[in-house]
Amino acid sequence: MEGPRARRIWRQRQRRNGTLLPLHIRRLSSTVSCWFCDFKTSVFNEPLFLVGRRNARFLRVWFSVGVGFGLTAILGVCMILLWEAAEMLNLYQGNAWLAKLFSDSLFGISPPVFGLNISFADVGCICISTVISVTAHEFGHALAAASEGIQIEYVAVFVAVLIPGALVAFNDELLQALPTFAVLRIFCAGIWHNAACCAVCGIALFLLPLILHPFYIHAENPMVLDVSSTSPLSGFLSPGDVITSIDGISIHDAQEWKEIAARAHEQTLKISNLLDFHFTMTNGTKGYCVPHSLMEVSERVQLRDGLSTCANEFMPFATLSSFNSGMLDDGSIENNHQSNRESIRCLVAKDIVKLNKCGNGWVKSASNKSSCLCSEDESCLTPVQTPGLTWLEITYSRPYSLECRQLGRKLSAGVKSPYSEEMNCSGAFVFVGDVIFMAHSIWLTAYRPRGSFSFGAFLPSILEKIFLCTFHVSLVLAFLNSLPVYFLDGASILEATLCYLRLTGPRMKVLRLCLLAGTLLSVLAFLRIFLVAIL
């Protein structure tokens, strides 16, 4: 009774593989046509078979657990497809799960815009992750078959109509004699190994700081690995620099860098919506306590096209209280601007950022609370800029430069030689512009080498990206092979499940109906995702 059921299951897999790839090949073989090419090898047949047979008892238990996971995955995927179908028919209004899986992050790579600004390093990580995920998938099928005593014919890698793929071919005669549950173990093994690959990547990401602790400092301050040539920070930061704070808030990794920049951008938009775009305006309530003596020797503001400008490295500053009162008077904003212009001073920004902060417009944290109070011989001045542009004060250090490393050794030896600006070991600068583009224009890492800055500084970031990318690719591969779609593992698992349930009469009709509906819904869902991504 088991033989005919297994034979029908195998016939589907043979149609999937055998018409394109012959079963009996030499040690190395290939096929090339106008729409299909492949590379087949039998080099791994004996090693995989020996590993499978020697550990058959353990592997059968392992892949039996995989059967439960595979069936649960197929059931979950079917529910998601029905959910998506209901949303496409406007029967349910909610967030598309498939769109989130494929659109919110591109295999773990999160560019500013979907599909845009992906570097060669990202493409390399995607390729490496794809090879790892596909290998894990097919390795699962091969080990499961070997544990059941099935001889592998060959392993193949192919490209069909620009779509890459891989597969393992089994011995037809031996597969026909297997019990149905053993066949289920073989077909579910690929999805199960992709799930295991996701778990391994998650554990590796969690333990990576501990593993690299002897060689790298983690989550102290982010270090710059690369600065894009189009970045507005290219003249201020260079590889090896360490960013210590933004607007006085200490940051520890690249995620905090982006989050603080996003909050500052939102704050700028709120202020910009309250003011006339055509007038030069102050950046809300973000100020500095400037001594009166410094204000007396400051440069005077110049007028160009009705806007306040300063020469060279100077920037316009205005008294915070006078601008706040002008902002509140909606009926005479132009007159207020004209009267407030007299209080605008041109000051050197790099000197001003060293002073105490005032006002409540700073991005706050538990350890950084701004105050509106300055001493009697100081005034609270705020930078003047156009709406939509964010003012950010960024502090940095350069611990990996030769001069700074020598100075650090002197300090550790007890020699009193404080950091000097002439050596440029640390400093601060002001950024005014599009803060979102700025935040994504540099490559940061939370890992800092304990030795000198070298190529090894890139290793933790590359490992993180590969693990994260492999997690996403394995998740997508497991999801795709769980779909009840023709020519995928989901179709074979579904047919084997119907055989196991002994649905002898209506089985083939139910199978065709499920595969037809699943294929149709999957095509519609992915078309929808594609349209959402490009619109």
Image (cartoon, rainbow, N blue to C red):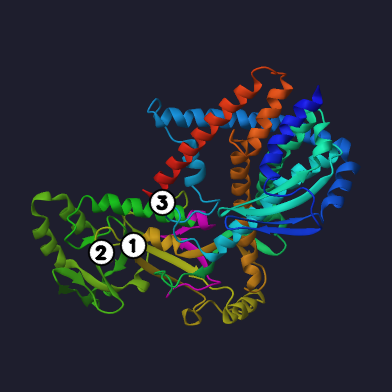
Q: Is residue 366 above or below residue 519?
A: below
Q: Are marks 1 and 2 in contact (CB under 8 Å)?
A: yes
Q: Which amino acid is tagged 3?
A: Lys
Question: In x, y percent, where is residue 270?
Answer: 28, 49
Magenta span covers which residues? 235-256
Residues at marks 1 and 2, CA–CA distance in whole angstroms: 8 Å
Q: Quadrant of residue 484?
A: top right
In the image, is residue 236 part of the stretch drawn in magenta? yes
Q: Is residue 319 above or below residue 69?
A: below
Q: Which amino acid is tagged 2?
A: Gln
What residue would you read off at disc 3?
364
Q: Which amino acid is tagged 1?
A: Trp
Mark number, residue 385 = 2
Which dot, 1 or 3, sits closer to the camera?
A: 1
Q: Badge 1 local density, few (<14 within 10 Å), some, or many (20+)?
A: many
Q: Is residue 376 left or right of residue 38?
A: left
Please identify the quadrant where the N terminus is shown. Answer: top right
Q: Is residue 396 left or right of residue 216?
A: left
Precedes in sequence: disc 2 or disc 3? 3
- Is label 2 in a helix, a strand or a loop? strand
Precedes in sequence: disc 1 or disc 2? 2
Q: Badge 2 local density, few (<14 within 10 Å), some, or many (20+)?
A: many
Q: Is residue 245 above or below residue 146?
A: below
Q: Residue at left 59%, top 40%?
A: 480
Question: In x, y percent, where is residue 504?
Answer: 70, 18
What residue would you read off at disc 1?
391
